[in-house]
Image (spheres, rainbow, N blue to C red):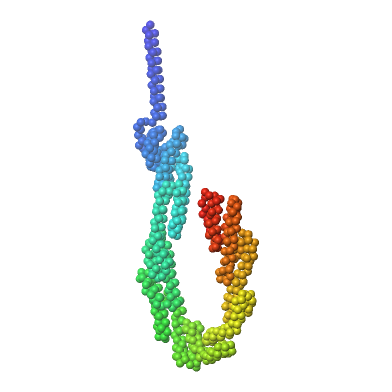
Amino acid sequence: MTTNTESNNWKISWQLLSLILAVSFGGIGFLATTVLLRLPSNPSCNSISLFFSSATNRIYCAQLEAEKNEVDSLLKAIALLEELSPEHPLRNEINRYTKEWSEDILKLAEKELNQGKLEEAIAIARKIPSTVQNYAMVEETIAQWNEIWDKAETIQEEIETELRNSQWNKAFLVAVNLLNINNDYWQTTKYQEIVKTINLAREESKQLDGAYITLRAGGLDNYLKTIEVASVIPPSSYSYNEANKLIEEAENKITDMVVTFVDNNDWNGLGDLASKIPDQSKLKTQARDWTIIASAGRNANLGTVSGMELAIAEGEQIPSDSKLYNKTRELLQSWIAQKEDLTHLANARDLARSGNIGDLNAAITKAQLVGNDNPLYREARQEIRQWQREIQIQEDKPILAQAQQLALGNNIQSWQNAINQASQIKSDRALYTEASDSIREWRRNIERVEDRPILDQAMALSNGSDFQQAINVASRIGRGRALYTESQNEIRRWRREMNAQEDLQRAYQTAQNSDPQSLSSAINIARRIPSSASIESQSRQAVNRWSEQLLMTARRTAGDYSLNSIEQAIKIAEMIPSGTSAYNQAREEIRNWRKELTPSLNYEIQPINN
């Protein structure tokens, strides 16, 4: 009995023990699994703890770092997980986190990029470990950034070029391309900065507009003012090149003026110009040379040997590096030659003062010693020509005087004798023009005497209305004769008279049919007869008569009082032109007839131009 009871108790104890063990080990296993699958609520993430911690603890600590969303914290988060082996059971989960955090780092880097910090953005991207699964995307992103930057900087260089060339509108058109750049920095900050720069450059350029206007106005004072205004533009300005070009153009124009003064021997103008160059001007050194040359030129113009010597001495002061050095050497050669020939010319003038033919010939011989390569040559030739003229006048004046005396007979023979006498003066002589004028007048006198009877005969024929015969007679006066123009004027007048008579006869013939169209045509023909014609009053009377006939015809036609007859009457009355005696009455009749056609309408009759 006892034994059985004990045996049963023992069995119950083992069953209880087994149950307890089962529950204990199951709880431990469940707890272990829970620990593995569930992150601890407050694990230690220091370096020592992480060294002995599980992968799940690392992931948790990495997530805590990544939540800071800073470059260093994201890199630290990636580093925590990248220490785990590639074969780790949670590698897929690890790769998902590291890829996400790498993209976050690139986003932070792109913020730097959008602030214009390319190098900083690339430096941040380069911190991403090459071991991350999506590292190829990092290199691709950096390449895209570099491409964006290269494209934007190329546009910026183009803008810079256009600005340096003062092409403001082109620069703005190029700047608009920045709006297509896929970067906030270039689309906003840099674009606005460049537009502001362009506008500033344009405003600076406007400062030169007045200088351009002044330059175009011309004149030394305006050129100097242009240089003064343009010199204010600093080298840092985009308008600096434009200002320099403006200064250079103004200086070139001043230099051109100097050359013109020298070429024209305008030494006073050159001296005034040189005195106006300000001390601070780059032209001041050249202006000193201009002053010396102007003084030398004025001395040379004195036309004396001492003046030439002083001019030569001053010209020798011009240095070889002067822009007018070569021009000065030419002047010096000229002045030296003038100095040698001044004596010859002065001696010639002394000889010519007596005015007799012998001394004048001697003066010519002296002046001919001046060579044709000497600046005084032209002056010498002028003197020679004047002295030769004086000789010719003394030689030919008696011939012309005798011819004029012969012409006083005032008849054809005396005029012909005068012509023969004056014709001895040849075309290369001083009195040739005077002699030719006299010969021309005497010949015209002869032609008038010869042709006046012919023209009088023609006039007599025209007075008898024999216009064609008058034309035939007057046509005998040839071209170039004294009465040619007068005869041609008369011939034109007679032809107009003939044409007027023909037109009037044709008008009469046309009007004989007496129908409206014939009368209208006759009126038009007669109205072409000019008011200067002798039959103008006759033609005017005929026109008035025919217009009255047209009005009478229109009235007779309207007498039928039919719609068609009134319309026809209006058409006939409208043929009467303004200025005729029947015109006003015709317009009144037309208004009345139109009222009969359409009483409710009030027509305004406009004048009809025929």
Vertical relation: 355 (above or below) 265: below
Residue 428 percent location from the top left of the image = 55, 86
- At x 57% / y 71%, what residue is drawn? 533
Residue 126 percent location from the top left of the image = 43, 45
Would residue 268 be found to the left or right of residue 463 on screen? left
Vertical relation: 476 (above or below) 600: below
Residue 172 percent location from the top left of the image = 44, 54
Vertical relation: 71 (above or below) 449: above
Q: Nearer the viewer, residue 275 or 241?
A: 275
Q: Nearer the viewer, residue 509 or 268?
A: 509
Q: How many badges with numbers are in the image?
A: 0
Q: Quadrant of residue 462?
A: bottom right
Q: Nearer the viewer, residue 403 or 576?
A: 576
Residue 433 percent location from the top left of the image = 53, 84
- At x 55% / y 61%, what residue is drawn? 582
- At x 60% / y 75%, what residue is drawn? 491
Q: Is residue 383 visible?
A: yes
- At x 63% / y 59%, what residue is drawn? 515
Vertical relation: 23 (above or below) 515: above
Q: Is residue 289 visible?
A: no
Would residue 119 be found to the left or right of residue 568 on screen? left
Q: Which quadrant of the figure contains the N terminus?
A: top left
Q: Which quadrant of the figure contains the C terminus?
A: bottom right
